[in-house]
Amino acid sequence: MGTHIGITLTGHVGSDPQVRTVQTSNGDRQVASFSVAVNRTNGGGQKQTLWVRVNCWQNLASVASSYVKRGVLIQVTGSWLRPSAWIDQNGSPQASLDMDVDRLILLDRANGDSDDTPEDETIPF
């Protein structure tokens, strides 16, 4: 029997999807990438936000580019989560989590008045 990871995130979209075509061993593939903020309140009562970079491939990339907008509450399901490293505008190394998704559900429309949307925070990627 093989191993499996199943991940479901529910959060607010932090940036409109960026669609690009990438070369893979199976030919060119379209991918739409955007950030999702997942919020919680820790035991000390402080609000914490975890940013995850979501990647939608092929047909799901087309759906994401048409319907996903900044501020929308979504739920994504995937089978892989990986760390990623990048350099910010100041030249400092940063880390993020990337998730390739298999399923995307729009839970509401962008309206800007949700208490869970971290509007005062800078999106780290």
Image (cartoon, helix red, strand yellow):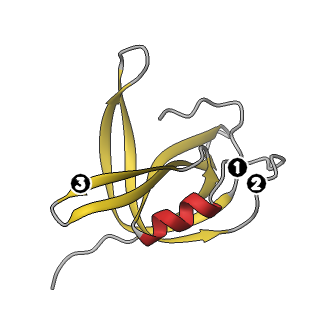
Kindly identify the amino acid type of the residue bearing the numbered disc 1.
Gly
Q: Quadrant of residue 25?
A: bottom left
Dot 2 corresponds to which residue?
A: 110
Tag shown at residue 23 = 3
Q: Nearer the viewer, mark 3 or mark 2?
A: 3
Evaluate if marks 1 and 2 touch, with contact meaning CB atoms under 8 Å apart: yes
Q: Quadrant of residue 63?
A: bottom right
| Label 3 vs 2, first from the N-terminus | 3
- The residue located at (66%, 53%) in the rendering is 69
Q: Position of residue 20 (x, y in %)?
A: 40, 50
| Label 1 vs 3, first from the N-terminus | 3
Residue 8: tell me if it is visible. no
Spatial distance from mark 3 to mark 2, Cα to Cα?
A: 32 Å
Evaluate if marks 3 and 2 touch, with contact meaning CB atoms under 8 Å apart: no
Kindly identify the amino acid type of the residue bearing the numbered disc 2.
Ala
Element at badge 3? strand
Evaluate if marks 1 and 3 touch, with contact meaning CB atoms under 8 Å apart: no
Q: Position of residue 60 (x, y in %)?
A: 47, 69
Q: Nearer the viewer, mark 1 or mark 3?
A: 3
- The residue located at (27%, 74%) in the rendering is 4
Dot 1 corresponds to which residue?
A: 71
Spatial distance from mark 1 to mark 3, Cα to Cα?
A: 30 Å
